[in-house]
Amino acid sequence: GSPATRRPGGVVCADNYDHHAQAPGFDASSHAPWIVVLPRFVDADAGTSTRSRFEKGTMHPKLLLLEFDGGTADTRFLRLVIASANLGGYDAEINNQFWACDFPRSAGAPTAFGADLEHYVSALLAPCPEQAAAWAARLREYELAPPAGTHLIMSIPGKFEREDARRYGFLALQRHLTAALAGRPAAQRPARIEYACSSIGMLTVDVHGEIF
């Protein structure tokens, strides 16, 4: 197995926990040397109405960040993996697809994709400041430039307004589609756009309106 599994902090997991019974934080002892982070669902001063919106909320990101040493510091690389379903036996039997991309050590300017990824990871790991800072620094070591046209659509617990709301979910998808189609003549705009979402059983007309 990977030597990371035996090194303190070598494996960091964001857990889908019972956020009614537990406060956000992290656990470095129950599964040591692994660190389990319990992401924040609502702010500590959130009111009853806000908390009720997240009563049945869950958080199980289908994202893996794997750092490979590559043999030398110069050949070290980072692999980002995003799955279409949970990483379990049942999901693998029904329908699970993976998008993976390898990133080399940084040799260029920061990218918008990299900024989105760093923001997402930092938000998930916020209850464990040491790991949030460590992963932010680690991500900046790599050239996070995916194939052209690839964007990261994030979803994290919480209530967001104005520009913050456009970072996540359907509004982020709307933002990227708008930017991609801006300036194109009508004849060059796609007549149909296909998309798939993890763990969403139904997409209603209202949801389509948010996207387009």
Image (cartoon, rainbow, N blue to C red):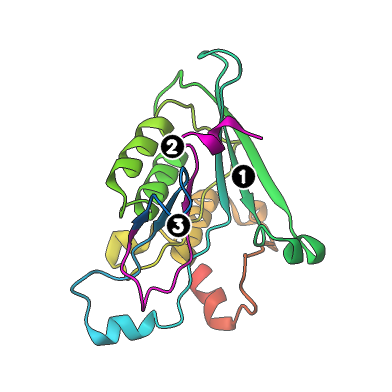
Residue 199: x and y, percent? 62, 70
Q: Kindly give the residue lying farthest to the right in the view shown.
A: 93
Q: Which mark is residue 81?
A: 1
Q: Is residue 76 above or below residue 42?
A: above
Quarter of the rendering containing residue 208? bottom right
Magenta segment boundaries in residue numbering? 1-25
Amino acid type at image mark 1: Val
**193 displayed left or right of 45:** right
**40 displayed left or right of 88:** left
Q: Main secondary structure of the magenta part?
A: loop
Residue at the spot of label 3: 175
Looking at marks 2 and 3 on the same chain, the residue that comes earlier in the sequence is marked by 2
Looking at marks 2 and 1 on the same chain, the residue that comes earlier in the sequence is marked by 2
- Residue pictured at 62% horizontal, 33% vertical: 2
Which of these two is toward me, 27 or 123?
27
Q: Report the Cα–Cα distance between label 2 and label 3.
A: 39 Å
Q: Nearer the viewer, mark 2 or mark 1?
A: 2
Q: Is residue 201 above or below residue 99?
A: below
Which of these two is toward me, 103 or 168?
103
Residue at the spot of label 2: 8
Quarter of the rendering containing residue 162? bottom left
Q: Nearer the viewer, mark 1 or mark 3?
A: 1
Q: Residues within 10 Å of mark 2 (few under 14, many from 20)?
A: few
- Residue pictured at 35% horizontal, 32% vertical: 137
